[in-house]
Image (cartoon, rainbow, N blue to C red):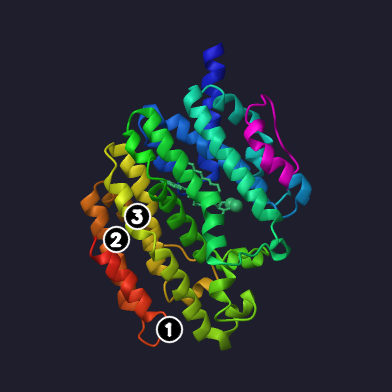
Amino acid sequence: QQTLAKDASKKRCYDFLNMTSRSFAAVIQELDDELRDAVCLFYLVLRGLDTIEDDMTLDLDRKVELLRSFDQIIYKEGWTFNENGPNEKDRALLVHFDVVIAEFLRLKPEFQAVIANITKLMGNGMADYATGEHRENTSVATIKDFDLYCHYVAGLVGYGLSDLFAASGLESEEIAKDKALSNSMGLFLQKTNIIRDYREDLDDGRQFWPREIWGKYADKFSDFIQPENKLKAQYCLSNMVLNVLDDVPQVLTYLSKLRNQSVFNFCAIPQVMAISTLALVFNNLDIYHRNIKIRKGEAVKLILDSTDMDNVVSIFRHYVFEISRKNEATDPNFMEISMAIGRVSIQV
Ligand SMILES: O=C(O)CO[C@@H](C(=O)O)[C@@H](OCCCCCc1ccc2ccccc2c1)C(=O)NCCCCCc1ccc2ccccc2c1
Ligand SMILES: [Mg+2]
Ligand SMILES: [Mg+2]
């Protein structure tokens, strides 16, 4: 009877994984046995934390209390949460979070420790950001703030994944040593999403683009949706893409160190989706009006092709070339973008 109950709650966790993630559920489920459950629970715990961070209807003090104590909450058997607003997209995960906690507590202690440590760092980072001096319109001031916020919400995921890869024995301890490489794996994904999500976040009253960049092109963050600001909007966008290109060399270096096939697929697929998305959004003013996504057919092709380093390198070369083709000489960022592309091109 016990095993039946245990299998049922594990199955429910994978149902929550498929419910809360379009892009990561498939690649997580392809991981080898030694890693699959740990990475699934790592995702669900952090998605639960992010569901609290994203909820703008929560009282700020209540939000901060939950963010800073989430690393202890995941040890509280039976804990659930139903204070999320009705429109919070993943509220069901927290309503049934006792199932996630029960499975988390069945992981090897070493995996639990990695997940709890990253949860503590991310929860406190999110809380610091939510209560920081720029709290009034949750805006990011400098490029340094931008890198720090993305480190909290995504770079730390890279840290934790590298630790899990090493702890599982499927990758060497070496992969977890170079924190800058693990950080870039998260920054590249998160920053690309932040560029793509300009309009969705603006409508939610949130802005993650650093004022140090967009302030060069407009007085207000929402100015870019006005047709008369088309040119400024294009230059601001290319400036944002330039900032993201900095992480490409480290992403390729990290991927080249992986040895386990299932880990490589898991790491490479989100990165090739991101470089494809980056080429799509570059000089594409539609991002100021709607959420654009790469076509399904292209995504499928990328997934099938991203199984070895040579293919991944040529996929990056293809999209970096596409960005250079779209790069316009009249753009004030033209030279910097050409040089950033040059730095990547000598590597791919
Ligand atoms: O609400 C949403 O749907 C989007 O939320 C974004 C936000 O609120 O900014 C934002 O929330 C961030 C806070 C929660 C992070 C949850 C997460 C994501 C992916 C994982 C993959 C594997 C294991 C654990 C994972 C944990 C978000 O989901 N951004 C997507 C990019 C995050 C990338 C994380 C990441 C970092 C390094 C990686 C290295 C290799 C493979 C996957 C990687 C994945
Ligand atoms: Mg979110
Ligand atoms: Mg969030």
Give yes or no for contact between labels 1 and 2 (Cβ–Cβ under 8 Å).
Answer: no
Q: Which residue is mark 3?
A: 250
Of residue 173 and residue 319, the one placed in the foreground of this image is 173
Q: Position of residue 199 (x, y in %)?
A: 58, 68
Q: Nearer the viewer, mark 1 or mark 2?
A: 1
* Label total for image: 3
Q: Looking at the picture, which amino acid does disc 1 mark? A: Pro
Q: Is residue 118 above or below residue 131?
A: above
**What is the CA distance from the residue labelled 1 to the residue labelled 3?**
26 Å
Residue 2 as seen in the image, left or right of residue 258:
right
Q: Looking at the picture, which amino acid does disc 2 mark? A: Phe
| Residue 115 highlighted magenta (yes or no) | no
| Residue 72 highlighted magenta (yes or no) | yes
Q: Looking at the picture, which amino acid does disc 3 mark? A: Gln
Residue located 29% across and 41% down the image: 258
Q: Which residues are magenta?
A: 64-84
Which quadrant holds the N terminus?
top right
Q: Which residue is mark 2?
A: 316
Q: Position of residue 119 (x, y in %)?
A: 58, 39
Of residue 328 and residue 250, the one placed in the foreground of this image is 250
Residue located 40% across and 68% down the image: 280
Of residue 303 and residue 253, the one placed in the foreground of this image is 253
Residue located 41% across and 47% down the image: 182
Secondary-structure class at tag 1 = loop
**N-terminal of the two: label 1 or label 3?**
3
Using the rendered view, name the quadrant where residue 69 is placed: top right
Q: Is residue 98 above or below residue 68?
A: above
**What is the CA distance from the residue labelled 1 to the residue labelled 2?**
24 Å
What number is the disc on residue 332? 1
